[in-house]
Image (cartoon, helix red, strand yellow):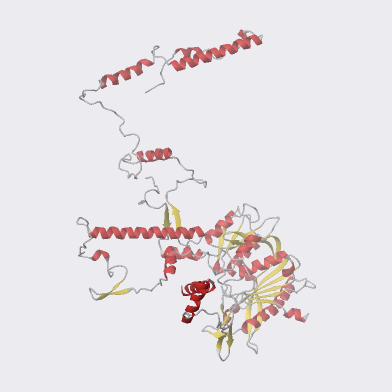
């Protein structure tokens, strides 16, 4: 029994003493006594931990003796998943393959031209590209090319390429799940949906439609919008009124006459019986004959008189008379 | 207007968003998952109804863990930790405050003075223990010498007494959760002068734990180890375990993973000697005198080979080809 008392499980990393073998043979009735007993027993346990703790090798510090604790033995769960190791970037892979070592660069570099120590990056830097007053022409240079502009555009290209590479590296890292914590990759051109559902793929026509609507909603009616290389010009050419030429050229029929004829026909068509829609008339006739046949068959089978039969619509025949191309427009 | 990827000069569909200020960057990095984790923060909040005792309990727990906990003062009606949909609010708060431990208090007729202590993993509920608080004795009711009052943030001692902690599953779980809740930061260097407080948990019966917070007083004894004295200081309460939810096996496995870099592997063949210092043995393999390939070909063999070739015996030429191949591989 005495041995069991001594065998407390001690976790020094967490400063824990655990007595797995204690039992309350009889619970004290009084609450205070119970607490006192707990504390008394606790004191024994803590004494055991303190024994182990103070016997560790300690170094003296200003505020007191400092002891190096061992790692805790009771395992507790993590609060966040383990970070995944970053995949090496394309440059890192290349450097490793070639054996290129990373050399630390100084912040100040000696500039021979001025004889001063200038910073490597930033304001008033060494070897600034923009500072060159004269660029000597090489044999390979074309006569009309501006070397300064050329340098600027080359630098811009280099910067763009670097940005593209950086994005690719981040995408690779994101694929593995090892994106750095302060970086977010955001898709810039997704349509805004209120729901969480994935936006469905829009067709070409729909896109053109939407683009057209967006264009017309701009202040200048989409006239000055930047168009991409493959984008077709807007369907409606913005001209909603057509003015006839003042002077008619030869070879054209009388445009003015045609225009007025057209308008006239449209007006007259409302009351004209001569204008005849053949297709519609045929359909109506066929439908009528079919119905008649059905009615006759029904009559022969059934014995009800026609009087009791409900007439469907007394006004239906009247609308049939006006066979016109009223609804048709060019 | 329309963005398409076919054009080479067009901007990519993805954009890289980084924080605009160093302060924001530091805040993000603080919340990022790390190999070795810092202290777990605690969120203390309460539900629809609380009683006086429960209010006192929550405030005292907050005071015990002042520097790494957040206390919400408003009531939260829609949090029900043990129900399927009732934990979304908790997970959201855990995400926003970056707290992985929470203490949720509620009071109802069925479960009076109820505390739900829970942990989250990756801001999703990992496990829960529901405890009822009985016989609560607050900080202010204990009288003690103010000089020995424990300071905020000091690393506590723990004493777990009782076979219940070993045998009863719920008490085992509660032990783990209490340890996680009050442990503070895991340190490798500890200043012995700053040891202040003790948490004593005694298992009484199969579902009850007497939880006490005491101040520590170290008295001079003859040896290096001082004599330990506990003075009851802080809240004392009986925790009656009501319900608990253990984590899934797979989730537990994932949460308990240790980074392979951190596992100290035994270094072979290294030993320390007091006089010589660090010692390691060098094992020299036996020299292969006969079968080592020589860098030069012996010249006297030419005639022999010529004769052998004339005979039609191809063994020597095969061997020579093999040797050449080996040399090439060795030199490459």
In the picture provided, is A152 more to the left or to the right than B241? left
Location of residue B154 in the rendering, given as x and y in whole percent from the top left corner: 57, 75
Tell me if I can see residue B291 in this picture. Answer: yes
Counting the numbered discs, the total is: 0
Location of residue A86 in the rendering, given as x and y in whole percent from the top left corner: 49, 64
| Rendered-image quadrant of the N terminus of chain B | top left
Q: Nearer the viewer, residue B212 or B95?
A: B95
| Residue at the limit of the structure toward the bottom, as seen here | B275
Q: Is residue B291 above or below residue B61?
A: below
Tell me if I can see residue B143 in this picture. Answer: no
| Residue at the limit of the structure toward the right, as seen here | A26
Q: Which of B77 and A20 is in front in this view?
A: A20
Location of residue B89 in the rendering, given as x and y in whole percent from the top left corner: 58, 55
- Identify the image quadrant of residue B244: bottom right
Q: Nearer the viewer, residue A256 or B18?
A: A256
In the picture provided, is B253 more to the left or to the right than B17? right
In the picture provided, is A93 more to the left or to the right than B76? left
- Identify the image quadrant of residue A114: bottom left
Location of residue B243 in the rendering, given as x and y in whole percent from the top left corner: 70, 59
Query: Which residue does the image show at 35% across and 35% down from the upper left?
Result: A235
In the picture provided, is B324 more to the left or to the right than B76? left
């Amino acid at each position: 029994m005495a041995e069991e008392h001594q065998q407390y499980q001690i976790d020094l990393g967490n400063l824990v003493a655990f007595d797995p073998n204690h039992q309350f043979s009889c619970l004290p009735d009084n609450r205070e006594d119970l607490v006192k007993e707990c504390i008394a027993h606790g004191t024994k346990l803590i004494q055991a931990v303190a024994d182990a703790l103070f016997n560790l090798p300690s170094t003296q510090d200003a505020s007191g003796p400092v002891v190096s604790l061992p790692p805790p033995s009771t395992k507790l769960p993590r609060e966040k998943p383990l970070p995944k190791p970053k995949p090496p970037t394309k440059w890192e892979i290349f450097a490793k393959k070639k054996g290129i070592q990373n050399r630390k660069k100084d912040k100040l570099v000696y500039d021979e031209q001025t004889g001063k120590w200038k910073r490597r990056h930033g304001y008033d830097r060494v070897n600034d590209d923009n500072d060159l007053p004269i660029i000597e022409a090489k044999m390979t240079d074309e006569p009309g090319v501006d070397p300064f502009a050329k340098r600027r555009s080359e630098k811009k290209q280099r910067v763009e390429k670097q940005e593209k590479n950086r994005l690719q590296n981040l995408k690779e890292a994101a694929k593995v799940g090892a994106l750095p914590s302060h970086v977010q990759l955001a898709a810039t051109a997704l349509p805004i949906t209120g729901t969480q559902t994935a936006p469905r793929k829009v067709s070409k026509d729909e896109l053109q439609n939407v683009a057209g609507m967006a264009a017309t909603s701009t202040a200048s009616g989409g006239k000055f919008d930047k168009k991409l290389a493959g984008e077709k010009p807007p369907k409606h050419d913005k001209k909603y009124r057509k003015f006839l030429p003042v002077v008619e050229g030869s070879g054209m029929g009388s445009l003015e006459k045609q225009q007025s004829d057209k308008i006239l026909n449209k007006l007259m068509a409302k009351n004209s019986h001569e204008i005849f829609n053949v297709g519609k008339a045929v359909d109506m006739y066929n439908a009528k004959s079919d119905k008649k046949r059905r009615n006759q068959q029904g009559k022969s089978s059934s014995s009800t008189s026609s009087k009791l039969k409900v007439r469907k619509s007394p006004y239906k025949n009247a609308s049939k008379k006006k066979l016109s191309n009223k609804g048709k427009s060019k | 207007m329309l963005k398409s990827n076919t054009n080479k000069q067009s901007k990519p569909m993805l954009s890289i968003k980084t924080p605009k200020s160093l302060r924001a960057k530091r805040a993000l990095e603080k919340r990022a998952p790390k190999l070795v984790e810092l202290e777990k923060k605690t969120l203390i909040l309460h539900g629809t109804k609380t009683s006086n005792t429960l209010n006192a309990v929550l405030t005292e727990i907050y005071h015990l863990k002042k520097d790494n906990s957040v206390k919400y003062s408003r009531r939260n009606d829609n949090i029900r930790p043990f129900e399927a949909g009732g934990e979304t609010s908790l997970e959201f708060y855990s995400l926003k405050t970056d707290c992985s431990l929470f203490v949720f208090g509620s009071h109802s007729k069925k479960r009076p003075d109820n505390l739900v202590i829970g942990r989250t993993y990756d801001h999703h509920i990992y496990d829960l223990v529901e405890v009822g608080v009985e016989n609560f004795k607050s900080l202010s009711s204990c009288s003690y010498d103010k000089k020995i009052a424990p300071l905020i943030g000091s690393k506590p001692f723990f004493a777990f007494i009782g076979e219940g902690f070993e045998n009863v599953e719920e008490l085992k779980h509660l032990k783990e959760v209490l340890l996680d809740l009050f442990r503070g930061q895991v340190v490798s260097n500890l200043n012995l002068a700053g040891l202040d407080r003790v948490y004593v948990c005694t298992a009484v019966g199969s579902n009850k734990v007497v939880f006490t917070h005491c101040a520590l007083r170290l008295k001079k004894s003859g040896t290096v180890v001082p004599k330990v004295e506990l003075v009851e200081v802080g809240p004392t309460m009986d925790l009656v375990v009501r319900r608990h939810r253990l984590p899934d096996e797979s989730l537990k496995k994932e949460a308990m993973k240790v980074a392979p870099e951190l596992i100290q592997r035994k270094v072979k063949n290294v030993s320390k000697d007091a006089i010589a210092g660090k010692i390691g043995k060098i094992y020299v393999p036996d020299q292969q005198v006969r079968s080592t390939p020589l860098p030069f070909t012996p010249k006297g063999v030419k005639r022999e080979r010529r004769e052998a070739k004339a005979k039609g015996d191809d063994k020597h030429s095969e061997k020579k080809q093999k040797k050449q191949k080996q040399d090439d591989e060795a030199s490459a």
